[in-house]
Image (cartoon, rainbow, N blue to C red):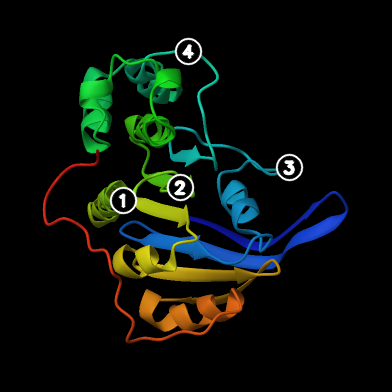
Amino acid sequence: MIGIWGCTVSLGGRKILHELDFGAGPGEFVALCGPNGAGKTTLLRALAGLQPGGTPEPKRVAYVEQGARCAWALSIEEVVALGRIPHGDRDRGAIAKALLDTGLTELRANNVHQVSGGQARRAMLARALATDAPVLLLDEPVADLDPAAAHDIMRLLARLAAEGRTVVAVLHAIELAMQYATRLAVLKDGRIVADDVPEAAAPAAAAAFGMGFNAATKPMLVPRAQGKAR
């Protein structure tokens, strides 16, 4: 379980979150949606204990920031191994599983600075998975990924939630949230304006973006029946 209650955050003299209540528990995959500036990243950082006054818990909560990149010219396997730092070990099983789950096993020896942006993004996700934390907080985890790889990662996150982890992810792709998340929390102007199963919260998400909502619309791209992230 992870949550914040009555949370108000001001940055640069501007109030970003307004007495906000939010919580998520094991088995839930919560998508945070809303327009730019709504407070999604600030909420995620507050949950991670990274706002002023917060206390990070790196063994319990793995956080992947938006646009996360490795600053060092490491191999992908070495990047993933960084996820074991909170435990003070180099658990080969956890590292190998994270590489496999994110489709990076064959690229494990490659320099992270010499692969595609999407592959580098998946390496940062694999680093978080290697921590084996019960709570995963992810800011735009499918940005830079092609549609097939995005579905693979979303399916992986849904499986991790089904296995008992708590997954909270900022997503702009509402259609992916509706397919894979168990809840959709919609932020606007630093407040949660809807928090429900995706089908029920989707109209509020569309309204927050200034768009209409058509429940009959079907996605044109569908995930493969089988396959790993690539």
Q: Contact (CB < 8 A) between labels 2 and 1?
A: no
Viewed as shown, does residue 163 lie left or right of 34? left
Position of the C terminus, as image quadrant, is top left
**Quadrant of res 218:** bottom left
| Mark closer to the observer (3, 4) | 4
Instruction: Indicate the secondary structure of the residue bearing disc 2.
Output: loop
> What's under tag 1, amino acid-wise?
Leu
Which residue is disc 3 drawn over? 52
Tell me which numbered mark, 2 or 1, is placed earlier along the sequence: 2
Q: Mark on residue 143?
A: 2
Which residue is disc 1 drawn over? 157
Q: Contact (CB < 8 A) between labels 4 and 1?
A: no
| Mark closer to the observer (3, 2) | 2
Is 229 rendered above or below residue 85? below
Instruction: Indicate the secondary structure of the residue bearing disc 3.
Output: loop
Q: Residues within 10 Å of mark 2 (few under 14, many from 20)?
A: some
> What's under tag 2, amino acid-wise?
Ala
Position of the N terminus, as image quadrant, is bottom left
Is 34 rendered above or below residue 171? below
Tell me which numbered mark, 4 or 1, is placed earlier along the sequence: 4
Viewed as shown, does residue 97 lie left or right of 175? left
**At x 30% / y 63%, what residue is drawn?**
180
Which residue is disc 4 drawn over? 73
Report how far apart the C-alphas of labels 3 and 4 lie in the structure. 31 Å
Image location of residue 18, percent across then percent down:
73, 67
Report how far apart the C-alphas of labels 1 and 3 lie in the structure. 29 Å
Viewed as shown, does residue 97 lie left or right of 68? left
Instruction: Indicate the secondary structure of the residue bearing disc 1.
Output: helix
Q: Residue furthest front?
A: 220
